[in-house]
Image (spheres, rainbow, N blue to C red):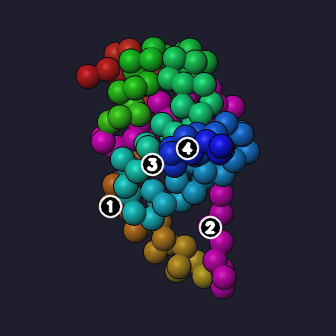
């Protein structure tokens, strides 16, 4: 008899593959840049963290406590670039900047795309530590 799984179980199984997880996060980030939906983007990161070993493992690799990672992942607040960077580093990835490309390479279209988000990405030069916990 074939075992039935939930969508979440299927997704987590697929995201255990690092290449698929990276592609999944890339799409989540692209969507975030268009609509500024922070909770949706954080859900994508949570799914990848779960599939790649869980909060405790990733927090340890990131050099932060599981509590700090959980607060970051379940917050609806604007993203903190420092925390996002250490989480991605723990997963073996990094943030990068890429040239926007369009069908007609119009710089007007590119600048329109940059201004469509309603929720800016917050940046911080402070190191990530438990002091960020609220």
Q: What stretch is highlighted in magenta?
A: 76-105
Q: How far apart are marks 2 and 1 (CA)?
A: 19 Å
Q: How far apart are marks 3 and 1 (CA)?
A: 14 Å
Callout 4 environment at 10 Å: few (<14), some (14 to 19), or many (20+)? Answer: few
Question: Which residue is disc 2 drawn over?
Answer: 100
Side of 86 where 37 appears, left or right? left
Q: How far apart are marks 4 and 3 (CA)?
A: 24 Å
Horizontal and vertical percent position of residue 43: 44, 43
Identify the mark nearer the N-term, 4 or 3.
4
Which element type, helix, strand or loop, lies under badge 2?
loop
Question: Which residue is disc 4 drawn over?
Answer: 5
Horizontal and vertical percent position of residue 33: 47, 59
Q: Can residue 92 be seen in this view?
A: yes
Q: How far apart are marks 1 and 4 (CA)?
A: 36 Å
Which element type, helix, strand or loop, lies under badge 3?
helix
Location of residue 94 by image quarter: top right
Horizontal and vertical percent position of residue 18: 71, 39
Callout 2 environment at 10 Å: few (<14), some (14 to 19), or many (20+)? Answer: few
Identify the mark nearer the N-term, 4 or 2.
4
Side of 57 where 32 appears, left or right? left
Q: Distance between the residues labelled 3 and 2?
A: 20 Å
Identify the mark nearer the N-term, 3 or 1.
3
Q: Can residue 21 be seen in this view?
A: no
Instruction: Tell which residue pokes out farthest to the left in this image.
Output: 134
Question: Which residue is disc 3 drawn over?
Answer: 41
The residue lying at 66 percent from left, 85 percent from top is 104
- Whether pointer 3 and pointer 2 mark residues with C-beta atoms closer than 8 Å, the reply is no
Which element type, helix, strand or loop, lies under badge 4?
loop
Indicate which label's residue lies in the foreground, 4 or 2: 4
Residue 126, relative to residue 112: is it above or below?
above
Which quadrant: the C terminus?
top left
């Amino acid at each position: 008899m074939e075992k039935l799984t939930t969508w979440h179980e299927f997704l987590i199984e697929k995201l255990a593959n690092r290449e698929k997880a990276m592609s999944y996060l890339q799409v989540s980030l692209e969507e975030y840049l268009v609509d500024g939906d922070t909770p949706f983007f954080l859900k994508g990161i949570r799914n990848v963290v779960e599939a790649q070993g869980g909060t405790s493992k990733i927090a340890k690799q990131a050099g932060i406590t599981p509590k700090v990672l959980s607060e970051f992942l379940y917050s609806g607040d604007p993203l903190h670039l420092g925390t996002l960077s250490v989480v991605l580093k723990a997963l073996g990835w990094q943030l990068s900047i890429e040239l926007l490309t369009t069908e007609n390479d119009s710089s007007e279209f590119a600048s329109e795309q940059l201004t469509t988000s309603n929720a800016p990405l917050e940046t911080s030069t402070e190191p990530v530590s438990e002091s960020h916990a609220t």
